[in-house]
Amino acid sequence: MITLSLCMIVKDEERVLKRCLDSVKDIVDEIIIVDTGSHDKTKDIAKQYTDKLYDFKWIDDFSKARNFSFSKATKDYIIWLDADDVILEDDRIKLLNLKKKLDKSIDIVLLKYNTGFDENGNVNFSYYRERILKREKNYQWVSPIHEVIVTSGKYVHKDIAITHKKIGYPDPKRNLRIFEKMIKNGDTLDPRQQFYYARELYYNKKYKKAIKNFKIFLDNKDGWIENKINACADLYNCYIDINDNTNAFLSLTRSFLYDLPRAEICCQLGHFFFNQKLYNNAIYWYEKASTIPLDTTRGGFYNLDCYNFTPYIQLCICYYNIGDISKAIKYNDLAGKVKPTNKSYLLNKTFFDNLSKK
């Protein structure tokens, strides 16, 4: 059996820290918590779970804080969590089993990170992250913001999830401020940082500046394919928000330069034509989305609904609008098989049931 060090960085997390630690305390062999300047009861809560509590002066650099936390670990492997993460019971059982059986030749274990949920709490947005790392390999975080592990060695994907349960919202301008501080200090953004800088501009509704920086990223021959495809999708949203439909459409089709069509992109193309009431065009792209297999191991972000529920429910509406009621009912039934308690599916079902009685 391997041993595990939990390493965390925290600041003002009194609302969520206990929930996180309760979910993991009997899985790990030591808990290391690095506080970056809390003003609430975070440190008091942490002391109830560990005596390995350290202070680290916040210097607008998540990587430095995380690397400091890793430096305090003493066990075979390191697992990291954020304070608003939890491990649900089924995943706790799987993680305990993994701890007993993990081949010690493995350097990195990638686990699912579930970060988006529908109205019924079902996961609809997820991706894999490097979550458990062999301590002796001395893996390091890089980038002050949107930090990432520089990986190497032998790795495996496991069907175990960390669930992100955010309460409240952090300062929405924090990440953008850090990027702009880096630029002001003369730092050159690498391709990954360029992508996330453009995203922060988009999130803060600085659309024209975001468009400029997404283009810089996309025009660079370097950069991860998954980020390139995400950039095309984000660029589309920027153009939609400034009412430039032509460039919005071209942004999505640009994603085909990097890989085969993704269901997420096909759904956006479907929405593009749906909003213009070009239902046959929308049908083409929604049907395409519904046939694309989901590959969760490629490492990128994926919206689970785009591979079944979203195209099904949209195809129902599209076929209804062109007068093909039988196909509309067919796709609504398919949507119901995916999400039997979804409000849209149930409303559609009631509508079609009443329609058949007339």
Image: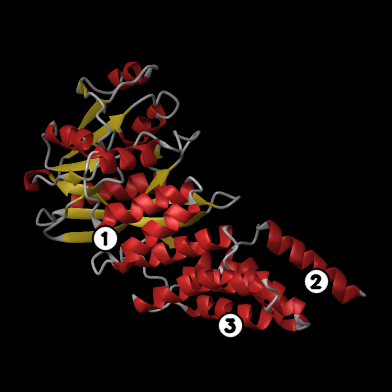
Label number found at residue 284: 3
Label number found at residue 157: 1
Judging from the image, the colouring scheme is secondary structure
Q: Amino acid at mark 1?
A: His
**Residue at 71%, 79% in the rendered image:** 319
Tell me which label, 1 or 3, sits earlier in the chain. Answer: 1
Image check: 49 left or right of 29? right
- Quadrant of the frame with the C terminus: bottom right
Quadrant in the picture for residue 185? top left
**Gap in angstroms between the C-alphas marked 1 and 2:** 43 Å
Q: Determine the secondary structure under disc 3.
A: helix
Image check: 348 left or right of 273? right
Would you name the residue on which mark 2 appears? 352
Does residue 129 appear in this view?
no
Judge the density around disc 3: few (<14), some (14-19), many (≥20) Cα neighbours within 10 Å: some
User: Residue 238, how many percent across, how many down?
Assistant: 51, 59
Nearer the observer: mark 3 or 2; the answer is 3
Q: Determine the secondary structure under disc 2.
A: helix
